Image (cartoon, coloured by chain):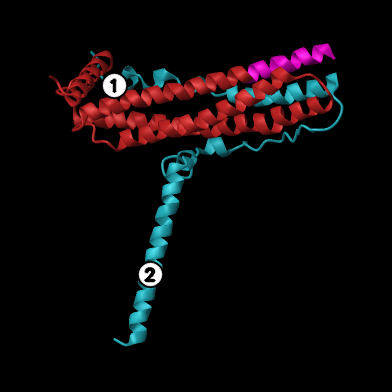
Chain colours: A cyan, B red
Amino acid sequence: MSRGGKNLIILGLIATFIALLSSGISLFIYHQSGDIYLDRSRPGFLPEKSETEGTSSSNNYEVEETGEVTTETIDEFIENFDQQVKNINSIENPFNPEDISDEVLGISAE
Amino acid sequence: MVSSKTTKLIIAAIAILLASSSNLVFASADFSSQTCTNVKKTLKTIQKNDTKTRTTIGPIYEKLQTKFIKPFNVRLVNNSLSISELITIQAEYASKRADFYQDFTSYSQSLEEMLALDCKNNLDLFSAKLTAVRTKREKVRDDVDELNQLISEYRGGIIILEESL
């Protein structure tokens, strides 16, 4: 094998090593940061069709940091604030301990 | 004379015994591979639902902090209104939101480790992991409850402020 051919193989091996190393580091960070647990594009975590339909919010309300504070501005704020709270409350009993009880898991306990 | 190492081992053994007696005890004879498969299947469904919950309410909690509470407090301060309580709530909310993110990650890591276990052949470890997962999940639940409480307190503070205008 010519010297150029050998160099080409070495270059290829180095490039592969760097690619594997950087991918490994990226995956490590992805896992350690906890982002993996929020990634719903993972197999088995894809949103259902009903979740993706009609999720776009038409509410463009923004709180201005400047301007007068009147009862009207407060009422408007409360109205939009409540809308967000309503979205939170739409999830019934989040992280309910009963979800993971022995009964639900089908484990016999003494 | 009993060495400190032996003492530590005895204490650890007692702790494990106490933990196992107060929590679930897998009857190994009854814990078939089928049960193991079913438990894991249920846990995977819980994992999926919890991820959905987290990705739904997490951004709303963030939005309430960055797009509502923070700018509105700035506006109130700019209008020379006394809002020390609302600023305290804002700080507590930010701290609790960080806890929520961290606790959820910790819980998810534990759950994933548990799902990777061969429960049929590692009953003790599986049992210990389940106890840890439950504790961490309860912590996430507590974070949610406290965040909701802070949201309610902030809203109440704004109403009181409005009445004083």
Check the image and report above or below for B66 versus A30.
above
Q: Amino acid at mark 2?
A: Ile
Q: Of all residues shown, which one is farthest toward the left?
A: B1
Magenta residues (range): B151-165
Dot 1 crowding, Cα within 10 Å, few <14, some 14–19, many 20+: some
Q: Is residue B160 magenta?
A: yes
Q: Are discs 2 and 1 located on one and the same chain? A: yes
Q: Say which element carries label 1.
A: loop
Chain that bears disc 1: A
Q: Nearer the viewer, residue B151 or A14?
A: A14
Check the image and report above or below for A41 versus B1.
below
Check the image and report above or below for B88 versus A52.
above
Q: Amino acid at mark 1?
A: Gly
Judge depth for marks 2 and 1 and give the one in front.
2
Residue at 86% across, 21% down: A70
Numbered mark located on residue A106 in the image: 1
**Horizontal and vertical percent for residue A86?**
63, 22
Residue pointed to by mark 2 = A14
| Residue A95 visible in rendering | no
Q: Is residue B103 magenta?
A: no
